[in-house]
Image (cartoon, rainbow, N blue to C red):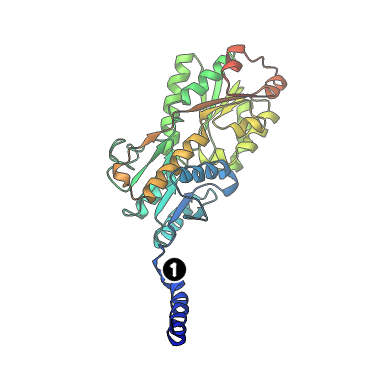
Amino acid sequence: MSGMGRREFITLLGGAAAAWPLAARAQQPAVPVVGILALAAPEANAIRLRAIREGLRTAGYVEGQNVKIEYRWAELHTGQLPALAADLVSRQVAVIVASTTPSALTAKAATGEIPIVFGIAADPVELGLVASLNRPGGNVTGVTSLNMEVAPKRLELMHELLPSVTSMALLINPAAPALAEPLSRISRVAAKALGLQLHIVHASSDRDFDAIFERLIELRVGALVIAPDSLFSNHKEQLAKLTVRHAIPAIYQYREFVAAGGLMSYGTSETEYYHLVGTYAGRALKGDKPADLPVQQSAKVELFLNLKTAKALGITVPLPLSGRADEVIE
């Protein structure tokens, strides 16, 4: 190669190298964004978020590498959801994950285009989120938990643990009627079948909790069932402490309630449930249409017992019951 030719060749190479990163950058697709529309506060969602990220990873998406996650927290103020949803829509996120009934309904009202993946306990057909479970038909699909179906089971477990108790209470949040109404209905039927008197008590804010426990003592109820609801999930540790302070045997849906001193929990496995939500979000990112993705049901349920609390309350746990528990906290 002559001196001239070689110098030209090197100059050409240098020019190409300088231009190359720009071209490469232009060709790389922008990283897709998953918008999470959450009713609760971040602390209450740690387990859920870990499971959603794991689900996304199953579908080949890793946060910070090939997917970005934008979080919008309503901090339990339902009224803030529409503005948060509108913000995610204006940012043109690739998919919206809505992990409660109010956030799922808000997301659907905000967009008919962006895929929405929900995680809810209520019936999505009854709520108008999807046309049918097998063929959702629109831009919405997701995962349902068994928390509605297992509601009577919580009463049965309490009855098995405390056979001499004839009066129990169900704590519901009237501000979320899509969950509260069917739960009250199902629980009344179950209580009647077990020969129990069931008092329904209401709390629509954590400020109501102290008054609720005063009321339970007045009613002389022998046990409390806490209905699945974002308000109660967000304050599960506080509720557990109140049940201990007032010596009221109680059951809720999550293990953390038992870890914080609550007597018993029975409900859908949070980890499995939100892993499915994350997997579906990943499939939507890959281009699968929600209309063609059947609504899934998370079938795994877990029973947790706190023997230390049982002992403090003077309750002897029958062996068949502790034998069925997924974990006994001592």
Q: Residue at x 44, y 28 (%)?
A: 299
**Residue 186 lies in what quarter of the image?**
top left
Residue at the bottom extreme of this rendering: 4
Number of callouts: 1
* In the displayed structure image, the side of residue 101 where residue 257 appears, left or right: right
- On the question of residue 214 being in view, the answer is no
What residue type is disc 1 on?
Answer: Arg
Residue at the front extreme of this rendering: 1
Q: Residue at x 64, y 29 (%)?
A: 262
Q: Position of residue 250 (x, y in %)?
A: 60, 26
- On the question of residue 311 being in view, the answer is yes
Which one is nearer the viewer's eye here, 90 or 162? 90
Q: Secondary structure at mark 1?
A: helix
Q: Which residue is mark 1?
A: 25
Q: Circle 1: is it few (<14), some (14-19), or many (20+) Cα within 10 Å?
A: few
In this view, 33 is above or below 102: below
Q: Position of residue 316 (x, y in %)?
A: 66, 14
In this view, 310 is above or below 11: above
**Residue 50 lies in what quarter of the image?**
top right
**Which image quadrant: the C terminus?**
top right
Q: Residue at x 47, y 28 (%)?
A: 300
Which one is nearer the viewer's eye here, 198 or 267? 267
* In the displayed structure image, the side of residue 169 where residue 129 appears, left or right: left
**Residue 123 lies in what quarter of the image?**
top left
In this view, 49 is above or below 9: above
**Which image quadrant: the N terminus?**
bottom left
